[in-house]
C-alpha cells in the first residue's frame, strides 16, 4: 500500500492498460457489518474489488499465477504495425498503432508487435510512421517521430 502497509488479497485477474502498464485485479477481504432483519448488527468481512499496480504485488512463494485470467497480453504484442501502400512513387511504409486503435486497419498487411519491435521499427524513419490518432510515440518515449 502507498504508506508501506501490506494487505493480503486474492488475485482475480491481470490487465494491461493502453499505456503498457500491468495491473492486478484483486479482492481484499475487508471488515464490514451485517445487519440482521431484527436490527442487530454484527461484524463480518466481505470481498472488496481493488486494482493494484503490478509493481506493488508480491507473489506468494510457491504459488503459480499462469492460470490468472489476463487481458491485454497478446503474447506481449501490444502494438500493431500496418503496411500501407505508397502514393505515387513513394515506397510502402509501416504505420505503428496502439493495439486498440480504431485506425489500425486498411493496410495490406497487419501484424502485432512487441514494444521492442515497435521502437526498432520506428527508429527506421524512412520505413515507419506513427499513427496521428493514437500517437504511440508518446507512450514509447519517442516524441517528434515522423508522421
Image (tube, rainbow, N blue to C red):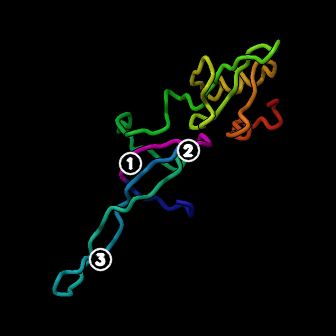
Q: Residue at x 19, y 81 (%)?
A: 36
* Quadrant hosting residue 146: top right
Q: CA distance from mark 2 to mark 3?
A: 34 Å
Q: Looking at the image, tell me whether mark 2 or mark 3 is earlier in sequence order.
A: 2
Q: CA distance from mark 2 to mark 1?
A: 17 Å
Q: Which residue is mark 1?
A: 11
Mark 1 secondary-structure assignment:
strand
Q: CA distance from mark 1 to mark 3?
A: 24 Å
Q: Which residue is mark 3?
A: 33
Q: Which residue is mark 2?
A: 17
Q: Position of residue 83 (x, y in %)?
A: 66, 19
How many other residues sit within 10 Å of disc 3, few (<14), some (14-19) or many (≥20)?
few
Q: Position of residue 74 (x, y in %)?
A: 49, 29
Which residue sits furthest front?
A: 88
Q: Position of residue 123 (x, y in %)?
A: 78, 23
Mark 3 secondary-structure assignment:
strand
Q: Residue at x 38, y 39 (%)?
A: 69
Amino acid at each position: 500500500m502507498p504508506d508501506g502497509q501490506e494487505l493480503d488479497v486474492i488475485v482475480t485477474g491481470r490487465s494491461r492498460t493502453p499505456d503498457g502498464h500491468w495491473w492486478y485485479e484483486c479482492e481484499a477481504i475487508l471488515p464490514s457489518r451485517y445487519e440482521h432483519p431484527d436490527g442487530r448488527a454484527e461484524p463480518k468481512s466481505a470481498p472488496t474489488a481493488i486494482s493494484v499496480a503490478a509493481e506493488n504485488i508480491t507473489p506468494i512463494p510457491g504459488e503459480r499465477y499462469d492460470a490468472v485470467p489476463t487481458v491485454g497480453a497478446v503474447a506481449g504484442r501490444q502494438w500493431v504495425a500496418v503496411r500501407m501502400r505508397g502514393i505515387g512513387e513513394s515506397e510502402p511504409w509501416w504505420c505503428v498503432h496502439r493495439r486498440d486503435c480504431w485506425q489500425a486497419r486498411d493496410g495490406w498487411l497487419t501484424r502485432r508487435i512487441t514494444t521492442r519491435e515497435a521502437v526498432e521499427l520506428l527508429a527506421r524513419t524512412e520505413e515507419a510512421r506513427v499513427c496521428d490518432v493514437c500517437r504511440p510515440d508518446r507512450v514509447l518515449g519517442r516524441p517528434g517521430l515522423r508522421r
